[in-house]
Structures are given as C-alpha cells and as structure tokens.
Image (tube, rainbow, N blue to C red):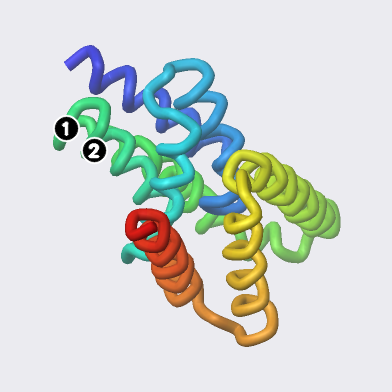
Amino acid sequence: MAECLKIFVSFFKIGLFTFGGGYAMVPLFRQELIEKRKYITEDELMDYYSIGQCTPGIIAVNVATFTGYKIQGAKGAVSATFAIVLPSLMIILLLAGILNVLSDNQTVSHAFAGIRLGVIALIGNEVLNLSKKAIKTRYHLFVFGVIAVLLFLFNFSAVEAVLVAAVLGGLRFFKEKWQ
C-alpha cells in the first residue's frame, strides 16, 4: 500500500504541474519517473508514449497506466491513472464556474497565450531530447524521415504513422535475422 501511495503522489504531482497535454508532460515524466524514482528507463518511457499514441485515450493517462502497472501491477495502474487525472478534474471543476468571467479579461488572455508558447518550447525541447536517444543509426534516421514526410505532406494520422514505423522496424529486424 505504501508503494501505491508513492505512485499516487508522483503522478499527482505530474498531473498538477503540467499544462499542454501529454507531450508537455514528458519533461516531468522524465524527471519524476526516470531520474528521481527510477521507476522506468528512458527506452520504456519512449515505448509507453509510442504505445499510448496508438491506443484509445489520452496519451498521458495511458503512459501513467502502463508505468503504474509495471511498478505495482493492477493496483499501481489504478493509482497512477487516478492520480494523473485528479488534478485536471479538480482544476476544471474550479475553472468551469469562473471561465466565462475570465475569458474577457485581457490579462488572463495574455497569460494563456504565454502558457501556450511555453508549452510549445517544452514540446520542442523534448522532441530534440527524444530524437537524440531514438535516432541511433542511419536506418532510424530513414524511418524518422519517412514518418515525418507521411505526417507533414500526406496528413497521416498518428496511428497510421506509428503502424508504418512498426512495419519498417519489423522489416529491419527480419532483414538482419535472415542475413
């Protein structure tokens, strides 16, 4: 039970201090789960994000569920999932009543614009960090390039892109295995 409480506190903090959605949570996931608690590795975080991207639901919730399950099984998954969602639920309930009043306030509008820009910078930083760790060979760079072209030029969905990347990765494995 003590471990589930630690899991809850870790994911509650992540949920409480993250703005901008699943990708903006990567720095907090890294800091709390990899560096501080050592619950998962960098590769596991990337795997959970990849799987979370192509499974139904919110990516951050999926990552929390996968991580909680790895740490403590079903109890850990429930604890992490509830903890990551609870802060947003509390804040949304609080803001729902006053949002109409705040939406016309210029200071609040400018603050939200600043938050959006900060979140974009956080996501960009994480893209660079993840790419440094994920792109290890020329083939990885090739797969990255193919997926980028499919996303940007052909408007592939995230699920389609992940599936194509999985097929390309699988082809590489089979090519190496049969040589």
- At 23% from the left and 36% from the top, the residue drawn is 69
Q: Position of residue 103 (x, y in %)?
A: 71, 63
Local secondary structure at mark 2: helix
In the figure, residue 53 lies in which quadrant? bottom left
Please say whether residue 152 is visible from this viewpoint.
Answer: yes
Residue of label 1:
73
Local secondary structure at mark 1: helix
Is 131 located above or below residue 104 in the figure? above
Q: Position of residue 165 (x, y in %)?
A: 47, 66
Q: CA distance from mark 2 to mark 1?
A: 6 Å
Is 50 located above or below residue 167 in the figure? above
Indicate left or right for 177 with 60 as reference: left
Name the kind of residue labelled 1 in the image. Answer: Gly
Disc 1 residue crowd, few under 14, some 14–19, many 20+, Cα 10 Å: some
Indicate left or right for 92 with 124 as reference: left
Is 47 located above or below residue 73 in the figure? below
Q: Nearer the viewer, residue 82 or 155?
A: 155
Marks counted in the figure total: 2
Indicate left or right for 1 with 28 as reference: left
In the figure, residue 139 lies in which quadrant? bottom right
* Residue 125 marker: none
In the figure, residue 25 lies in which quadrant? top right
* Residue 77 marker: 2
Disc 2 residue crowd, few under 14, some 14–19, many 20+, Cα 10 Å: many
Check whether the beta carbons of the residues at disc 2 and disc 1 lie within 8 A of each other: yes
Q: Nearer the viewer, residue 173 or 129?
A: 173
- At 37% from the left and 23% from the top, the residue drawn is 39
